[in-house]
Image: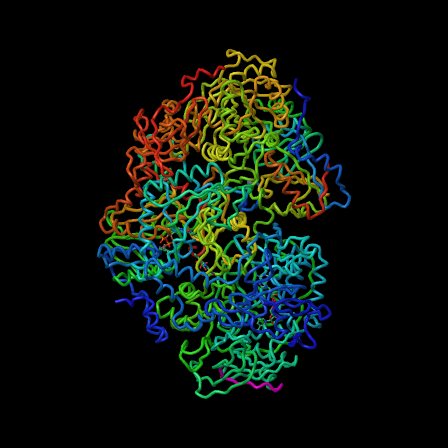
Amino acid sequence: MLLIPCPYCGKRDEHEFTYAREGHIARPTNGEQLTDAEWAQYLFMRKNPKGVHYERWMHAKGCRRYFNVARDTVTHEIYAVYEMGQPAPVIERENGR
Amino acid sequence: MVETYQRRSALAHLGLVARAASSSTAGAGVIMSEVPHRTIVNVRGTASDVAFSSAVQTATGLALPSAANTVSNGGVWQIVWLGPNEWWITGPDGEAESLIEALRANFAGQHAIACDVSESRAIIALKGAKARDVLMRGVSLDLHPRAFRVGQCAQTGLSRANVLLHLVDDTPTFEIYVLKSFSDYLWQWLEKVAADFNLAVEA
Amino acid sequence: MTQVNRLPHGGRVDSSKPLRFVFDGRPYEGYQGDTLASALLANGVVLVGRSFKYHRPRGILSAGAEEPNALIQLGQGNRSEPNLRATQIELYEGLVAESQNRWPSLTTDVGAVNSLFHRIFPSGFYYKTFMWPKTFWMKYEHFIRRMAGLGKCPTEPDPDRYDKLHAHADALIVGAGPAGLAAALAAGRAGARVILVDEQQEMGGSLLSDRQAVIDGVSAAQWVANALAELRAMPEVTLLPRTVAFGYYDHNLVSLMERVTDHLPPTSPEALNQPRQRLWRVRAKDVILATGAIERPMVYIDNDRPGCMLASAAQTYVNRYGAAPGKRAVIMTNNDTAYQVALDLVDAGVSVAAIVDARENAEGELVATARARGIEVLGNHAITRVGGKLAVREVEVRRLTGDGKSVSSDGRTITCDMVLSSGGWQPTVHLFSQARGKLKWNQDILAFVPDKLLPGQNNHSVGAARGAFALTDCLVDGFAAGTAAAHAAGHTEPAGSTPVAGAEPAHSPMREMWVMPSGKPLGHDGKHFVDYQNDVTAADVALAHREGYRSVEHLKRYTTMGMATDQGKTSNINALALMADLRGVAIPEVGTTTFRPPYTPVTIGAFAGIDKGDFLDPIRKTPLHSWHEQHGAPFETVGQWHRAWYYPKPGETMHDAVNREVKAVRTSVGIVDASTLGKIDIQGPDAAWFLNMVYTNAWSKLEPGRCRYGLMLGEDGMVMDDGVTSRIAENHFHMTTTTGGAARVMAWLEDWLQCEWTDKKVYLTSVTEQWAVIGISGPMSRKLLSEVAPDLPLDDQSFPHLSFRDGVVAGVKCRIFRITFTGEATYELNMAPSYAMHVWRALMQAGEKYGITPYGTEAMHVLRAEKGFIIVGQETDGTTTPQDLGMDWIVSKQKPDFLGKRSLQRSDTKRPDRKHLIGLLTEDPNEVLPEGAQIVAELKDKPPMEMIGHVTSSYYSPNCGRSIAMALVKNGRNRMGETLYMPYDGKVVKAKVTEPKFYDPEGARING
Amino acid sequence: MKQHYSIFTLARNAVSYHEKWTEAWRSPDPKPSYDVVIVGGGGHGLATAYYLAKEHGITNVAVIEKGWLGGGNTGRNTTIVRSNYLWDESAHLYEHALKLWEGLSQDLNYNVMFSQRGLLSTAHTVHDMQALRRRVYAIQLNGIDSEILTREQVAEYCPILDCSPTARYPVFGASLQRRGGVARHDAVAWGYARGADARGVDIIQNCEVTGFKIENGKITGLETTRGSIGAKKVGVVVAGHCGVLAGMAGFRLPIESHPLQAMVSEPIKPVLDCVVMSGQVHVYVSQSDKGELVFGAGIDSFNSYSQYGSPPVVENMLNALTELFPIFSRLRFLRQWGGIVDTCPDASPIIGKTPVENLFFNCGWGTGGFKATPGSGHVFAHTIATGEPHKLAAPFALERFTTGYLIDEHGAAGVAH
Ligand SMILES: Cc1cc2nc3c(=O)[nH]c(=O)nc-3n(C[C@H](O)[C@H](O)[C@H](O)COP(=O)(O)OP(=O)(O)OC[C@H]3O[C@@H](n4cnc5c(N)ncnc54)[C@H](O)[C@@H]3O)c2cc1C
Ligand SMILES: NC(=O)c1ccc[n+]([C@@H]2O[C@H](COP(=O)([O-])OP(=O)(O)OC[C@H]3O[C@@H](n4cnc5c(N)ncnc54)[C@H](O)[C@@H]3O)[C@@H](O)[C@H]2O)c1
Ligand SMILES: Cc1cc2nc3c(=O)[nH]c(=O)nc-3n(C[C@H](O)[C@H](O)[C@H](O)COP(=O)(O)O)c2cc1C
Ligand SMILES: [Zn+2]
């Protein structure tokens, strides 16, 4: 079970949080001008990386804030948590892990 | 006409008053009671905005708690930290309307809100030497006295209910705020756990 | 027979406390402090079980958690438990145990015929046969299933209770041998919060079986006692004996299972007053793994005969339990540790016929001592035959050839009743590996040892668990790790100095020898067991190799090696080393299989703890719940809520009750508890903008005091929720959602505000439970309300449909919404929950003269269906657009954007012939279609038939005097008047397509 | 020619101490190029190769597997096989697979121990029951066996299930597919591998695909840890890893990889003769031929490639298990593990073409693809061989995420299985 450092409440068990999918996917404001295929990219297509994943969590049983997490999808190591609206930090990893 | 006017607390149906009368707190490891009615006003605003914090201070006489997971109190009110831009102001029953009015007046021109949630929560007080032993069975937070001190609060899960825990004193006494619809479940659950620690019920 | 093999002295058992027990129907006696295994051995019982596949007679191999053979069905009736290891069962008065997997008895087991056919049952045989005739597999399988399995499942529910809790520690120390105790002392003295666990009943680990060791100038036993006394006195140290650390998960979460009462007679008051077992979930800053090492048996021919045992186990039985596993031992080894065993046995008066040492030049301090004590040492020898079937009688030994691959032709027979073997020690790296640490191979000790940690985990392996076998090293390791853990957690009180061990004999090198040649090709005569419990032999490993199952994972799955209840604790290394040899590669190249939780099997019931029955999932109750209960309402489950379903009067069926309730609403007045509706308070200057984005219709022009129905779509354009939202003030709205959708909608709205529209000024507060909701509906509702709320003007001008007013009802402040889900004039009274019961009773009392009728969710559903109102989740299923529902009218054409808008333009979502919501009237008006019935346009005499839709809602409508149904049907709106067919349950029902509005289609009744 | 497997050959080999068996499949070095390369040596990949050779005569084929055959989800699933899906498209596809299962052991001459012991899906609320009816009626009209059982019938069919009406989530009824059941998962991979190998397919283990060679939008080969390999066509069947492979080919998929956990109890004598699945009280369970109870949990919410999930998921499942089967409380669980499942927004697979010519993907089976193995391999082989989707596969094209024609099987897939 992950131990997630909520940027507001501190470290809490994973069961207090809701996973809220891949982060940094902006909603197109020009939906009408996009093709169906372009719209599908936004709606459905995901990076799903093996390695660092920039994702959102919501502290559902705590402060109910959404925030970003950079987490390794193989080791589950959490590299960073940061508030909504902040840019994704670049994560340097040892030996290509 | 209508039968006599009656107000019921969330756990009234459990007959706690009668049970308290027949249970003794002497030697109890855990004492449970319901705190029936309390004003709770949800306040949202920008913590760093001085206009906002002083608006709250003017209405309550209290500063917003500066640290996460803490409660500030003094006088009639306490302010409970819920999140980076969210607090509860709690106080005696029946004060919500006037408090909200005062807050709204002070908030004029700001993006800040107050919303009455007094009636949505039941409050269960759990105290005694074994109170932590009971809570450990449902809370994954570290409640060790060095880690969770008097005056601290936390929103978390307690077994399968979401709660706000507040450590009021070092008896220890915990106040547990829970949505009313879950209060029957939570009370029964706590009672079942507390049965191993010599439970008494208090009115 | 009384304890024939009990030694006159020695051991930690309490001979002043005899305990009676029964094994396979026969009574025996043991002592307090015995395990079932030690007590059986003390009684001279060596045959304790049968193997899984061949039903070979088996004895006790080990003295601990690694036991593969001595599996026992413990206890009786609803407290019976299968597959327990005799080596871990603590003896108590009245214990009843049975051997398993044998019939009719342990000594004459019919299943042993398998052993006769063993030649055609090599690993994987079932993949090669039982395929003909094709239909016969189920018959073969039936037979195979009966043969398989070990113990029996109880047939009654478990009468015991379980406990579970969360805990936190600066250091969780697993294993209370010298390394763990030293760690605990160091960390505890420094002031850290420590949890020390050991799965055995007594703490001390290997020191409990050690008669030589001296620590800090006292005997090992005394040192353990001193250490435990000191630890017990420390308030921040928790000692948990009988507790296995079974799982190591992400971010240093370790699960423990404490056996609280398993050592007590199960129905004794002491046992019944406590939970049986306790599940601990410990989040530790540091985990110190002092889990010791497990001895490997040697793989020699017929090494499974009862009487074949691990050398260290015999030492434990003798030293710790005062029970001799036999009278005369032959010891087989490739390392020095078995020599100490021999010495201890001889000290205890057990004879050692010979030490058969595989090493070419068995020399060194311990060897010399053994020789000096008169023990025969046969260097460079192997055991080539084990005589005896139900018990060892003798062995034959032969000289090994230079390469160790074969033996001399002549042998010598030695009489003995036990064969003790030591093939070296494998550090107990299970938890380290579960934590996803990487192992490396250590050629000196021929074992895998911990190497690299996974980032995010923090643990330290100490002592034998990291391959440091000298007692001194264990103490030094442990003490240093304990100190470091305490320091890291900020505790720095002085901790004294590292415990000091007395002098230890130096150990000579081991010989790498994975299978003992017997003079015949493997598998030709006799069996070299690798995995005892699953009957996997060295020949099976060779077969797997031959057939291409060469990856260690294939080897495991093809032969089932390591998959038994012991998870291969004694067998995995031997098997993979054999495979390495066959493949001609180094052992680390073969690698280990994956270590997974649990370390030893753990009780399923403990995971439920007390969360059974109603605690499985909370039941959410409305403030009026007890009223509904008192009035006999059954409840409908909606999410976690229990909602009153209907209120049967004496003698009424559900159908009767619902009809009565539905009629009452249309003719007079009904009252309903609608408190479960989701409610969200929305405030801020951008609130109207926000609603415009999340709903399909327009909100800017809604006036304060007015209400509007809204439909919410997912970004995929599919209907997600609906509800009425009211404008309280310019920047203040009150939204309602469906009961089931409340939490989802709240999270959805927060998501958009917090993540996407961060510049918008809107705050949301969930107020679902701030307001109890009582609906009164029907032509008399206005009259009724006027009586309990005399000050409130109720005429259509002052209080029109789709508006709300604040007022006082029965003395209670209420917010009253005039909205309808029944089509009748309806007032939804919102008030503080603490007054809800009062208001409800007041309404019931005042309404009595109108025949006010409480109605439940079922009547509510019928009423809305009569009107053709949808229920999200019933008429929709995540694939339904507003257009499908015929609700185009609510989708704004003007708004530039709202959630879901773009998706409605996709080629499939804008198709005109999608499934449309329509009404269905069955040919027979009394026929009520089942919800979920499938619809076909062209009936065939048998399936398959093309389905064009399904019935979403279907009821008997007392107001229409017939059944009504709604359905989603392909191109339905263009099928009005068509007859469709519903084939189900062996019949076909015909129905005609209509508009999905069955009652008062013009909506004339809204004003009462 | 491969050695035939039967009781007779077993007996014959017994005489020679089983020393004459030959390898079930070869371990060749990769050739410089192949007509078709299948990436992923799970059940689906191996079945694809098998049917390419058997049905389409394409034998210059390699299966490239980064680890050991069947070590992905094929080797870690709860082995439930059924075809009772709601939508026509799925029902047809899974039924196609079920029919192949029924003759698979004979076809492969490898006993995959397919046991049609019946599959019970319980309903615990009124709403559950409605959804269940809808599904059963649809399945029946698709000509597939499925029945509705009342609570009493459930209690009779599976007596150890707690059917008391006072349970927190009482059993209201169940659907039963008698032809559903379980199979021996590893044997499926091995049987297909042996069958494919016998027809000339090269099975290459311990070889990871690290990149694609794409020229002018067309695949020409792949990079692997054992060098580059040319390929006219490539079929990617890597389950949880499909996102990684799609990334190598320069596009994205509507897929997220999540851990899904399962566990086994210690082996016991037979107590449970059918498969039981419950969506509300979330658990699915069967008893294997070796005697252990096999139960499955739900997916972890977060993306992961780790084959390790969170303990609460398992804890909840065990809690649910004791609720449905109170007699299991004193049993002990022996091992827990996780797999990486490729979840699609509509809980249906993706089979077919990709933006790269001659590169085909078969993925998105998520929590329920084991049952589809033979069918999936069969239609995918057709798709690769002909370059056009098999008619059963056509609705499952990647395209659907653009048009919106989703095949939402969340209801049918309510519990992972
Ligand atoms: C716990 C669990 C329970 C389940 N229960 C059921 C059930 O009861 N019924 C059911 O029908 N389904 C079930 N499933 C789902 C089912 O297991 C899968 O859908 C199915 O096995 C997928 O098969 P596959 O051959 O596509 O994938 P896999 O068996 O995962 O094979 C994919 C292979 O691709 C390989 N690979 C990945 N990347 C590369 C690369 N770069 N190069 C080379 N090779 C690569 C992998 O190593 C792997 O061997 C369950 C899954 C899990 C995890
Ligand atoms: N070759 C050799 O000479 C050799 C080999 C092995 C051990 N030894 C001796 O054994 C001792 C090793 O000391 P140590 O402290 O490292 O180990 P130990 O064997 O003394 O103690 C380990 C303890 O850990 C417990 N344990 C293991 N896994 C557990 C789990 N998952 N949960 C709970 N408890 C668990 C065991 O019950 C045991 O009591 C030394 O005295 C050493 O000299 C010597
Ligand atoms: C249907 C099924 C039955 C299993 N039965 C057993 C078993 O009896 N004993 C065992 O140790 N493991 C059993 N396993 C689990 C495997 O040992 C292993 O954990 C699983 O295949 C995942 O692989 P991994 O743990 O090597 O990652 C079983 C797995 C499956 C899928
Ligand atoms: Zn938080």
Percent across and percent down for residue C44 are: 61, 75
Percent across and percent down for residue D417 are: 42, 49
Percent across and percent down for residue D404 are: 33, 36
Q: Which residue is rendered at x = 58% and y = 40% of the image?
A: B161
Q: Residue furthest front?
A: C651
Quarter location, residue C472: bottom right
Decide if residue D120 is in sight here: yes
User: What's drawn in magenta, residue-wise?
Assistant: C372-382
Quarter location, residue D85: top left
Quadrant occupied by the N terminus of chain C? bottom right
Q: Is residue B168 left or right of residue D164?
A: right
Is residue C993 inside the magenta stretch? no
Relative to C263, residue D236 above or below: above
Decide if residue A33 is in sight here: no
Q: Which of these two is toward me, B71 or B186?
A: B186
Q: Which residue is rendered at x = 44% and y = 51% of the image?
A: D275
Is residue C377 inside the magenta stretch? yes
Q: Which of these two is toward me, C766 or C761?
A: C766
Image quarter for ligand 4 equals: top right
